[in-house]
Amino acid sequence: MTHTATAAPNKPPPAGGSTGPRGTKPAPAKPDRAQCERLMWQCRGSLTQGATEDLGTELIRVGEWISRQGIQADMYGYGEFIQSFERNIAERLGFEAACFMPTGTVAQLCALRVYADAGTNRIIGVHPSSHHVLHEDDSYSVLHGLRAATLAPWSRPLLARDVKNAQERPAVVSVELPVRWLGGQLQTWEQLEELKRTCRELGVKFHMDGARLWECQPFYGRSYADICRGFDSVYVSLYKTVGAMGGAVLVGGQGFINEARIWRHRHGGNLFQMLPYVASAAMRLEEALARIPGDVQRAKALSEGLASDSRLTVLPRPVQTNMFHVFFRGEPAALERQRDRIAREQGIWVADEFSNTRVPGVVEVELQTGKGFESLDPKEAVRAFLSLLEPA
């Protein structure tokens, strides 16, 4: 599941059977995260890319896979299996070296710190929706004394002209491919190549937040190594899309990775044993990557079906990865109740969270086709989603 918050406990009504304002009944209690996960797991299909099985089942599968492979445990990441996996990712992305990281946050903080220490300033150039500034509790600033400079408007991906026109030249530019909060939008290949070239000419280090890099390949129609060529470093997630229990990998030059390992230790990220996380990724990586082109095609079919309803707005259009956002009128709490009803009656999980937007009365939802969508017919999925708009 991708829920990030749970509802506050509901207070019991006063004795005598309380009612709401003007005698109305109080709203039904909002399901907590555990209830949502149980309901989602019971569904036969999903329009989101949440967990498909409980952690206990996953741990059993990982343990059995490790036993079958005859893998020996690592110690602080040192062991043939871990290092072989790191080499695999480095070679796949076209880099000299790689380092497993416990989280993407740690991976990117290590990268930014290395570049800042080697540069002439401590400025990082970012998009306003960057994970660094929205989802990491200002760790780049609090822990490392870095300063974020917003280079582009929210409404589009960061481009070469944004770097050229920056009031202060940053030590490093960090871009997310694709941009999650723009529904998975990407620069065109020409725009991306110009951005790489501009950073190189200006002497600015170029880092990729590749949390969802895996999904970009069908759009560009090039190898991962070709996409990454021109970046100084890349971080990839092992649980997003791949579906592992957790973890990330940071890739770059050998000297850069040597320094990143030191900063991993300083961040408290040098786990005594990394094997369970890496095995969880390694045992499914090839299958997960092979599934992506089909996921993207299914996302296109789903998005076009939804866009044909005038009550819905799809972003981006056409869809560029297996992710997109949908905007429509509604109220989050009421939509969550409708979502749960659809899950119980139709066995389809149509959304995770409904977020209010700056437009009053309009909500936004993120959809992402994955393994849970494979058993669904796109037309059936569209009908299930449109059930959200039916009267309660």
Image (spheres, helix red, strand yellow):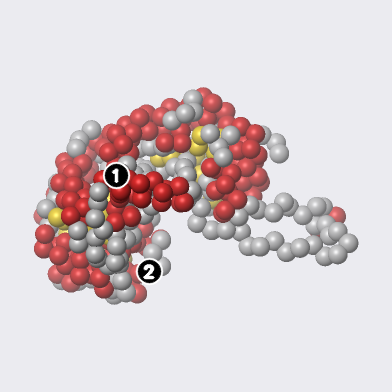
Dot 2, how many residues are within 10 Å of its Cα: few (below 14), some (14-19), or many (20+)? some
| 247 over 312 or under it: above or below | below
Query: Which one is in front, 114 or 50?
Result: 50
Residue 189: percent from left, percent from top: 22, 39
Q: Quadrant of residue 135?
A: bottom left
| 28 over 41 or under it: above or below | below
Q: Residue at x 41, y 49 (%)?
A: 60
| 28 over 105 or under it: above or below | above
The C terminus, quarter of image: top right
Q: Quadrant of residue 349?
A: top right
Measure the alpha-carbon separation of dots 1 and 2.
Answer: 43 Å
Q: Secondary structure at mark 1?
A: helix
Identity, as a three-letter code, of the amino acid under mark 1: Arg
Residue 309: percent from left, percent from top: 54, 29
Residue 144: percent from left, percent from top: 28, 73
Residue 318: percent from left, percent from top: 38, 32
Dot 1, how many residues are within 10 Å of its Cα: few (below 14), some (14-19), or many (20+)? few
Q: Which mark is residue 379?
A: none
Q: Residue furthest right?
A: 16
Q: Is the Cβ of the residue at disc 1 closer than 8 Å to that at disc 2?
A: no
Q: Earlier in the sequence, mark 1 or mark 2?
A: 1
Which residue carries the number 2 mark? Answer: 138
Which residue carries the number 1 mark? Answer: 68
